[in-house]
């Protein structure tokens, strides 16, 4: 199952995860992408400066791990993606965005602050 930019919009996110667990085959995978990061500078800006287009529900890595575990999933991998500087470069129209520059920014700045979203891979497991 792929849930891309969806979970934060569900009225009951935990109940949605339980339903996803129910419909998945044993050992099936759940991929969640574009999950709004609670440490995101972009989300902070949307809430406090723009005061529009922000997500009502934000997630942290430990929070989504706990929710998945309670719903019956085993977390395979969780990480940050959709970084602030990537959207900045896109807005100013820089062509051929150099990977060296992106890697330098990732080393200098904390990833969790400049990441707008989280990405999760989880697996349905039966624990006895």
Image (cartoon, rainbow, N blue to C red):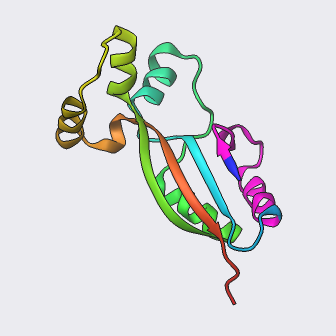
Furthest-top residue in view? 92
Left or right placement of residue 120 versus residue 102 in this view: right
Furthest-bottom residue in view? 128
Quadrant of res 66: bottom right
Q: Position of residue 26 (x, y in %)?
A: 74, 74
Quadrant of res 81: top left
**Magenta-drawn stretch, dominant element (helix, strand or loop):** helix
Q: Is residue 63 above or below residue 58?
A: below
Identify which residue, 36 or 76, lies in the foreground.
Answer: 76
Left or right placement of residue 107 versus residue 35 in this view: left
Q: Looking at the image, which residue is at 26% across and 43% down?
A: 110
Total numbered labels = 0
Q: Looking at the image, which residue is at 17% across and 36% down?
A: 104
Quadrant of res 70: bottom right
Q: Which residues are magenta?
A: 3-22
Q: Looking at the image, which residue is at 19% across and 33% down?
A: 100
Q: Is residue 125 above or below residue 111?
A: below
Identify which residue, 52 or 32, lies in the foreground.
Answer: 32
């Amino acid at each position: 199952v792929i849930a891309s930019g969806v979970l934060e919009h569900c009225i009951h996110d935990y109940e949605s995860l339980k339903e996803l667990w129910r419909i998945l085959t044993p050992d099936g995978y759940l991929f969640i992408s574009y999950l709004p990061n609670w440490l995101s500078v972009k989300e902070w800006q949307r809430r406090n400066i723009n005061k529009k287009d922000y997500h009502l529900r934000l997630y942290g890595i430990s929070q989504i791990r706990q929710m998945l575990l309670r719903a019956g999933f085993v977390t395979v991998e969780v990480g940050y993606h959709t970084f602030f500087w990537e959207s900045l470069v896109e807005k100013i129209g820089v062509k051929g965005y150099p990977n060296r520059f992106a890697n330098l920014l990732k080393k200098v700045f904390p990833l969790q602050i400049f990441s707008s979203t989280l990405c999760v891979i989880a697996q349905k497991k039966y624990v006895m």
